[in-house]
Image: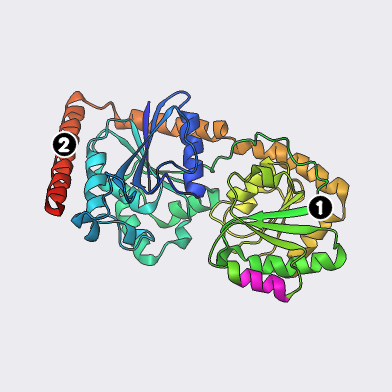
Amino acid sequence: MHISFLIHNAYGIGGTIRTTYNLAGTLAEHHDVEIVSVFRHREEPVFAPSPKVRLRHLVDLRKGTPGYEGDDPEYERPATVFPSAEGRYKQYSALTDRRIAAHLRGLDCDVVVGTRPGLNVHIAQQARHGVARVGQEHLTLGTHSAPLKLVLRTQYPRLDAVTTVTEADAATYRKLMRLPGVRVEAVPNSVPAPALPPADGTGKWVVAAGRLAPAKRYDLLIKAFEKVVAERPDWRLRIYGAGAERAKLRALIDKRGLYNHIYLMGPATPLDPEWVKGSIGVVTSSLESFGMTIVEAMRSGLPVVSTDCPHGPGEIIEDGVDGLLVPTGKVDAIAAGLLKLINDDELRRGMGRAALTNSARFDPAEVAGRYEALFTGLASRSGLRGSLHRTRGALLSSALRTSDRSRSALRKAKTA
């Protein structure tokens, strides 16, 4: 089976990029797999793809390179296919509209997978007949604006399947989106087992990781950890990540005199070596579309104290077995959960062992198996691609590439 993933920018950093590489690499053990990145802004990707996965891009934004296209006149004109209500809209243009269309019409694959709403809309409209069309949702329906939901309600019926990362979100799609004939499946993100030995539960460190953004509610975590320090000053907290909230959080730490107990560590890639230094993971978000850091911590042998926010934590953590779920937005509850594990070595280590065992269901092999079953069924339903479609697609793609080269040559001539 030939599977093609379409992603915003495979050369960046983020959960969608990481989980796409995980899934593609595992599927590539038995299938022909490629990742097509709309944008390329650096020479090498942050996350190294499997050597069995082909990686290519559609628009080159590497300044100072011969292929740079940021000065293309089409790049300055707004997109008309990529929905204006999508969060990344300003990065898309008439140039991306044309490149994505050429790519999708020239596809020679069994399954094409989009990884964000705007790209799913492109696939719904432009992927040629005979290719199974799958739209992944890495956020939640509830986080989309009303205008974007309207676009998706109009376009998603053209897809063959929509996948969400939680059962709760899949249920919401089935109830609210009216997608007759479209399979709506919940398939979680995958997280590979760390190459390092798991944490042993003896280090007096609590670890958190993620964007320093308002939704992560690190302000609550800092206030909760102040209560932890009052009872157990021998424990400390490390927060990994970057974001707009850093200065605000730094000021809060200093104001409360916690600079010797709470450390803003900045981003770290990979995070596995940092997780295993700790004994407890913590998440204080008001909303999680899935909860990649929860799974990462558990795969490193850490029990996780997490707010029971929509949508992911409650589907990942078995409360009281491999972690603790606490009410969202409650400083005292977060502090109590942390202290419960800090003050009971046997409970903490037992939950860590359970976390290590239970999180194996998120292994890439397990998740890829679920996608493989979905893709096989969809490809069979879509039928085999005819040679005529392949020939037409190849001719169109070739013609558009020739057109692109002509435009580039014209720009260079004008510059000269």
Q: Amino acid at mark 2?
A: Leu
Position of 268 compared to 80: left or right?
right
Residue 398, by quadrant, is: top left
Residue drawn at point x = 27 percent, y = 54 percent: 70
| Foreground pick, 132 / 190 | 190
Position of 162 compared to 223: left or right?
left
Is residue 310 covered in magenta?
Answer: no
2 or 1: tag closer to the N-terminus: 1
Quick one: quadrant of the N terminus?
A: top left
Residue drawn at point x = 31 percent, y = 58 percent: 151
Mark 2 → mark 1, Cα distance in angstroms:
61 Å
Position of 55 compared to 250: left or right?
left
Residue under label 1: 204
- Identity of the residue furthest to the front in this view: 416
Q: Where residue 339 appears, x then y in whole percent?
A: 82, 59
The segment highlighted magenta reads 248-255
Is residue 253 covered in magenta?
Answer: yes
Q: Amino acid at mark 1?
A: Lys
Residue under label 2: 396
Q: Where residue 48 appears, x then y in whole percent?
A: 49, 37
- Identity of the residue furthest to the bottom in this view: 255
Q: Is residue 354 visible?
A: yes
Disc ID at residue 9? none
Position of 247 compared to 183: left or right?
right
